[in-house]
Image: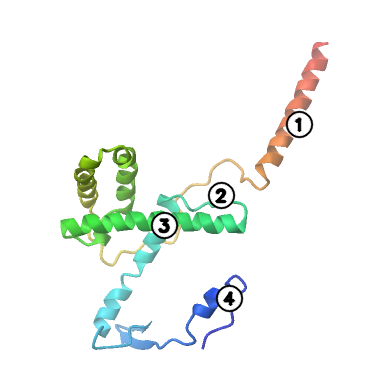
Amino acid sequence: MRPQRPIWMSESIYASMPESLTMREARVAGWTLASTLIDPQQVNKRELFALYRQRWHVELDLRSIKNVMQMDLLRCKSPEMVEKEIAAHLVGYNLVRAVMAQAASLSAVLPRQLSFKTALQILNAFEQNLRCCPRGRLASRHAFVLGGIAQARLPNRPGRVEPRVVKRRPKPRALLTKPRQALQKGLRRKQQSIQKQIDQGLR
């Protein structure tokens, strides 16, 4: 049964949720998998287990959004603007993935075999070139960009595991815990006090 609506969820989104879900339970290699792919003729247990082993792609996608697209720190101040900021990042992410899908289709590879980071770097590098390109040459330059993205292939890494630790070393600077303007005001006040002491000493 559908649980109660969380505080953060709007009524319209809650109303669009189904009243119930039909789940399928499958036991494979000591694992119990639950899935909405309920037809065993369409997806058997082995295929379901192979799909489950690809779950780490989700974490890589989140890493691409947060680290590669620099959404790990949200810069807007109001909840409304934060929602728009997240939406803008997701639109940009999907646009890059769409271009990667085009490149993969032309090169007969899977989109998952291409590097998201390299694709984004190529698009950023050619942004101005494509923007100012004459219309008659746009198709050839677009094909050139797709060819470059198609070359950015990832190695085959089945069964990949990663430790859940943070590699980034802490910086010596303190964290910004107050509004920047308030800290700037305090620094200016301190500068004025020091300057006043200097002026008094020179008299």
Labelled pair 2, 4 in contact (Cβ < 8 Å)? no
Of labels 2 and 4, earlier in sequence is 4
Q: Residue at x 56, y 41 (%)?
A: 172
Residue underneath mark 4 = 11
Residue underneath mark 2 = 75
Q: Where's residue 56, x and y in %?
A: 35, 66
Which quadrant of the rendered structure holds the C terminus?
top right
Residue type, numbered disc 3: Val
Residue underneath mark 3 = 91
Q: Give SS at disc 2.
A: loop
Q: Which mark is residue 117?
A: none
Q: Residue at x 49, y 47 (%)?
A: 169
Of labels 3 and 1, earlier in sequence is 3
Question: Closer to the camera, 151 or 7?
Answer: 7
Tell me if mark 3 has few (under 14), some (14-19) or many (20+) residues whose alpha carbon lies within 10 angstroms of its own: few
Of labels 1 and 4, earlier in sequence is 4
Question: Closer to the camera, 119 or 178?
Answer: 119
Q: Give SS at disc 3.
A: helix
Labelled pair 4, 3 in contact (Cβ < 8 Å)? no
